[in-house]
Amino acid sequence: MNGGTVILAIVMIAAAYLIGGIPWGILIARLIGGPDPRSLGSGRTGGANTMRAIGPRAALVAGLLDAAKGSVSVLLAIWLGLPPIVQAAAGLAAIVGHSRSPYIGFRGGRGVAPGWGALLVIEPVVALGVLPVFLIVLLVTRISSLASLATSVAAAVGLIVAVIMGAVPAAFLLYAFGGLALIWLFHADNIHRLLTGQERRVEFRGQR
């Protein structure tokens, strides 16, 4: 990359971080008059906590918007003609922004939704293929964090296989390994609770 491209890449990565930081769960909660997701459960702004705060329908909207943060970040990099390594970095920046949002005191969610959204652009077959992993683990265990961790591993493996098969450039190995590392890092407290048998379970409609 020449000097101009490097500067553009840096600006793009910074923009992806800011896009990723948009706290949709909080914004939607304020819009509909619901409680701030940070006031409940884990105190995070991710899907499970947002559902506890504002219910499944509003949480679904927030989750889709969170996923869009990752998709938009990668699509912008593509639109600007930046190489795959920068596209991967933009996806990772969106994950970091979501989990360490500059708009809410560097707090946020776990990075799963924007991570999946970025993957949907990078390799849609893998992104769609890992959805059953999340749903099955969630339905069997009722533990959202375990479903997210399992899905992140499946996504990383799937993307690595896609690189080996030549479906996507090797530069996206950065996203495979980096995304997996970030999501597990941002789940550190969940992992501790999983190991000690204290992790929270998601209550589906009709359960008490």
Image: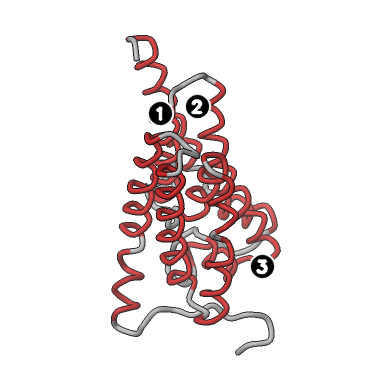
Q: CA distance from mark 2 to mark 1?
A: 7 Å
Please determine whether, in this image, residue 106 is positioned above or below residue 151: above
Q: Residue tagged by mark 1?
A: 86
Q: CA distance from mark 2 to mark 3?
A: 32 Å
Dot 3 surroundings within 10 Å: few (below 14), some, or many (20 or more)?
A: some
Dot 1 surroundings within 10 Å: few (below 14), some, or many (20 or more)?
A: many
Question: Can I make out residue 55 in this image?
Answer: yes
Image coords of residue 83 (percent x, y): 43, 24
Q: CA distance from mark 3 to mark 1?
A: 34 Å
Return the disc, 2 or 1, that comes first in the chain's sequence.
2
* Closer to the camera in the image, 44 or 143: 143
Q: Could you tell whether 29 is left or right of 17 in the image? A: right
Q: Residue tagged by mark 2?
A: 77
- Res 56 label: 3
**Residue found farthest to the bottom:** 208
Image coords of residue 100 (percent x, y): 38, 48
- In the rendered structure, which amino acid carries the disc numbered 2? Ala
In the image, which is nearer the foreground, mark 3 or mark 1? 1
In the image, which is nearer the foreground, mark 2 or mark 3? 2
* Closer to the camera in the image, 142 or 200: 142
* Secondary structure type for disc 3: helix
Return the disc, 3 or 1, that comes first in the chain's sequence.
3
Q: Do callouts 3 and 1 mark residues in contact (Cβ within 8 Å)?
A: no
Say which quadrant the N terminus sits in. top left
Q: Do callouts 2 and 3 mark residues in contact (Cβ within 8 Å)?
A: no
Please state the total of marks drawn on the protein image.
Answer: 3
* Closer to the camera in the image, 102 or 124: 124
Q: Do callouts 2 and 1 mark residues in contact (Cβ within 8 Å)?
A: yes
